[in-house]
Amino acid sequence: YRLTSEWENGTRERETVVLSNEGRDGTLASGSAWRRRSDSGIDYWLRADETGIFRVATKSDTDAEPSVDPKPRYVLKAPIAVGTGWQATTTTYLLRRNAEFPPEIRHSHPSIPVQWAVDALDQKVETPAGAFERCVRVRGNATVRLFADPVNGFKDMPLTTLEWYCPGVGLVKVERVEPANSTFLIGGTMTMDLMAWE
């Protein structure tokens, strides 16, 4: 994936992210699951059943053992129909404080409730890896309450995510918007586009 982050001050960063599917893995005490690994050193275990596709555990390279999710964390909930919704948690990826350390909001707000819903079906998506059809778009909406500045005080900052999942490929595109519009904070947008897949 090509990951592009753009902040409200005009700063832009670009990097490549690689996610690999490692196949079925039987190391979890709760039984086997499909393991997906990020090149940043994080493993995710996923299962699928009649309720949808959901994550059951995660592990970073610094963890001795996988951390089991207390309840299924859905990626896509069944039925795959407009309006199907579910809840999960997220954190901020872009919002930062201008004059505090650490500047990233995710350190003080690691678990923000997010409401997900299937937003559209039969979507066409263009990525560097090609054009995809019959894709499902899901939308995540969340807010985080932060001190914006002395004039406005605390404000609810919106966090909006769009994800596109396509048949035979999976996740092909992500768009995340975290506006700050504040003197004390800076926000921005992040996009992740599929560059290649096997």
Image: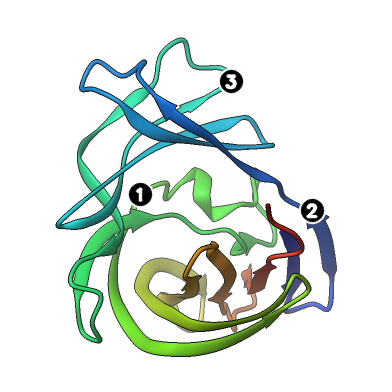
* Crowdedness near tag 2: few (<14), some (14–19) or many (≥20) residues, C-alpha within 10 Å: few
Tell me: residue 76, above or below residue 180. above
Q: Are marks 1 and 2 in contact (CB under 8 Å)?
A: no
Q: Rounded to the nearest whole Å, what is the CA distance between mark 1 and mark 2?
A: 25 Å
Does label 2 or label 3 sit earlier along the sequence?
2
139 shown above or below 54: below
Which is more N-terminal, label 3 or label 1? 3
Label 1 sits on a secondary structure element that is loop
Amino acid type assigned to the residue bearing label 1 in the image: Ser
In the displayed structure, 50 sits above or below 129; it is: above
User: Mark 1 or mark 3, which is nearer to you?
Assistant: 3
Q: Which residue is mark 3?
A: 61
Tell me the number on the disc at residue 53.
Answer: none
Foreground: disc 1 or disc 2: 2
List x then y, in percent, for residue 28: 31, 19
- How far apart in space, not on screen, are marks 2 and 3 (Cα)? 19 Å
Q: What residue is shown at x 42% (from left), y 80% (from top)?
A: 137
Residue that carries the numbered disc 1 in the rendered image: 111
Q: Position of residue 99 (x, y in %)?
A: 69, 57
Report the front residue among 124 and 163: 124
Number of numbered markers: 3
Q: Is residue 5 left or right of residue 159?
A: right
The x, y position of residue 117, in whole percent, is 28, 76
Residue under label 2: 16
